[in-house]
Image: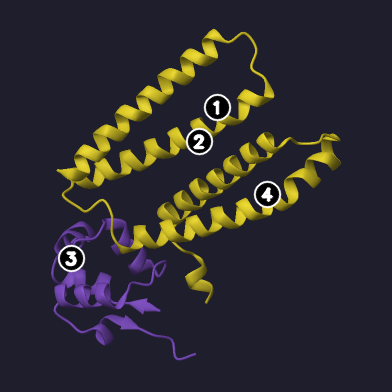
Chain colours: A yellow, B purple
Amino acid sequence: MKDKTVIYVGIGLVIMVILTLAFYVLTTATITLNEIFPITIALVLVIFALYVFWDRMKNIRKGLPVKDERIMNISYKAGYYGFMAAIWTAVGANVVISILFNLELTASHLTGIIVMVSGLVFAISYLLLARAGDKTLKEE
Amino acid sequence: MKTRIKELRARYNLTQEDLARKIGVRRETIHFIEKGNYNPSLNLAHDIARALQTTIDELFIFDEK
């Protein structure tokens, strides 16, 4: 019952975020670079949250648990990859952007990029580990 | 590491979902253990062995490398 409540509250929040984003994008004439980062971050989080809720709902309907030790392990592993990505982005983003685009990033842009990259890496690694399993175990 | 989970499941006529429900994990966890893409904890290995009425060393085959 608790799991179901969490899912329903989560889905409600996701719908509100989507509506807010849609309203914002539709009413804004031009979207600047400062607005692209938060919009992208919100979109990544929304899509990832929708997948997680759908996956949990599927298991609840079958009478299976929403979390088990494998899900906890892949969450930790994806969290580690996201953290490493955040560190390397903090170190390298400014250098790469200045070489490629000859631009100097502000602190807020850099923060946006770090959050976006680490969030994306977390989401992608979580999805890959959840759908395909840990293939590295076969190489050990 | 190889496992005999699939073989024992077939013996007791259990699907991956039945076994998952019996030990309280998700179906995918059983699937990945069978394929060798996930190494279960000792507790989970014990639960699976118990559900399939065998022992851990009968259920999991370790490479002697």
Which amino acid, by three-letter code, is at mark 3?
Answer: Ile
Query: Which of the pair B14/B22 is nearer the observer?
Result: B22
Q: Quadrant of residue B22?
A: bottom left
Q: Secondary structure at mark 3?
A: helix
Task: Residue under label 4, please give it.
Answer: A89
Which amino acid, by three-letter code, is at mark 2?
Answer: Val
Q: Residue at x 49, y 46 (%)?
A: A123
Q: Residue B27 vs residue B14: left or right?
A: right
Q: Badge 1 sits on which subunit?
A: A
Q: Badge 3 sits on which subunit?
A: B
Q: Residue at x 50, y 31 (%)?
A: A42
Give whichever of discs 1 and 4 has the lower sequence position.
1
Which amino acid, by three-letter code, is at mark 4?
Answer: Thr
Q: Are marks 1 and 3 in contact (CB under 8 Å)?
A: no
Task: Relative to A110, say whether A27 is above or below.
Answer: above
Which amino acid, by three-letter code, is at mark 1?
Answer: Ile
Q: Position of residue A70 (x, y in %)?
A: 35, 62
Give the spatial CA distance, label 2 vs label 1. Answer: 9 Å
Give the spatial CA distance, label 1 vs label 4. Answer: 19 Å
Q: Residue A42 vs residue A14: left or right?
A: right
Task: Residue under label 2, please give it.
Answer: A44
Task: Residue under label 3, please give it.
Answer: B23
